[in-house]
Amino acid sequence: MASQPTTLTPADLQRFERDGYVVVRQAFPRAEALAMERRWWSELQDAHGIRRDDRSSWRQIPGNLKAAKRDPAQAGILTESVRGIFDDLLGAGTWSPPKDWGRTIVTFPEAGNWELPTHFWHSDNPCAPHLDRPRGLFIVSFIGSVAPGAGGTLIVSGSPRLLIQQERRLPLDQRRGLGTRPWERFNRSHPWLMALTGQAPSPGDRIAAFMDRETTVEGVPLRVVELTGEPGDMVFCHPVMVHCAAPNRGVWPRFMRIKQQFLTHEGRALFRSLIRAGEKVP
């Protein structure tokens, strides 16, 4: 990590170290995001018959948008500000521009009350390449507006620090044990986590218990955070951030991109070494 940040503030870096993520408003131009959003609507109409001005046509689609994944316009996301953030979090000269900005996710609103999920809490990346420092990022980019309760990805603030802390304590043979993913141990490691992930009875008010206040586990403060934002906003997370999809109970589709694995050169080499060694990785 750079000793003198060029884009993020010292408080931003402290937040990333403590909580595992940092939110950057207008990391890339709002106009660029809205132009992408228009092209996503065009693809929805052409490929799925879903029209922006006809809510009766709105429905969940299988998979993600294909043309949007390859859209050259996404190059506009890599602004000088975003380059500076990568340098601040990963180190200058350690990374290459991404080929794309990840999955193109559209989640249409559905009726019902918003509830905090109990299942599918997970991390997409192995801990091994990141035990001493993050050698990659998990990145969320807002293409459209995402309001509270409108499908924003849920993260467990503090989970990367606790997950890696727990992983470091394990003997090497247990880290590489077959059939057990790190977050499965993590989810069983404390009553608060067991209740969050549906492995123990939930409190009556899950939002109050898990989102409105922090709970300290093994010296690490944890809290569920809903990622909301406006077009052009981005969230940069530690690569082993524990997260979960959420229902969209809003009035507008969620348009987001999620880059699950953006690795440094060193991180990519370490990840490949795990694969060659036969390590089971998420």
Image: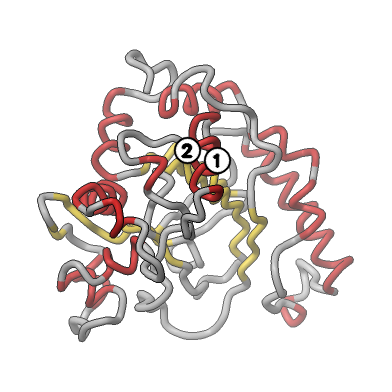
Specify few, some or many for label 1: CA neighbours under 10 Å numbering under 14, 14-19, or 20 or more: many
At x 24%, y 40%, the residue is 18
70 lies above or below 65: above
At x 36%, y 68%, the residue is 180
Helix, strand or loop status at disc 1: strand
Placement of the N terminus among the 4 image quadrants? top left
Residue 262 in picture, x, y percent from top left: 55, 40
Specify few, some or many for label 2: CA neighbours under 10 Å numbering under 14, 14-19, or 20 or more: many
At x 30%, y 56%, the residue is 173
Q: Which residue is mark 2?
A: 136
Residue 104 in picture, x, y percent from top left: 67, 56
Residue 118: quadrant of the picture:
bottom left
Residue 116 in picture, x, y percent from top left: 35, 74
Residue nearest the viewer, comparing 254 with 31: 254
Helix, strand or loop status at disc 2: strand
Residue nearest the viewer, comparing 68 with 273: 273
Residue 123 in picture, x, y percent from top left: 42, 59
Say if mark 2 contacts mark 1, CB within 8 Å: yes
The residue sitting at the top extreme is 4
- Disc 2 residue type? Gly
- Disc 1 residue type? Phe
Residue nearest the viewer, comparing 68 with 268: 268
142 lies above or below 189: above
CA distance for labels 2 and 1: 5 Å
Q: Which residue is mark 1?
A: 262
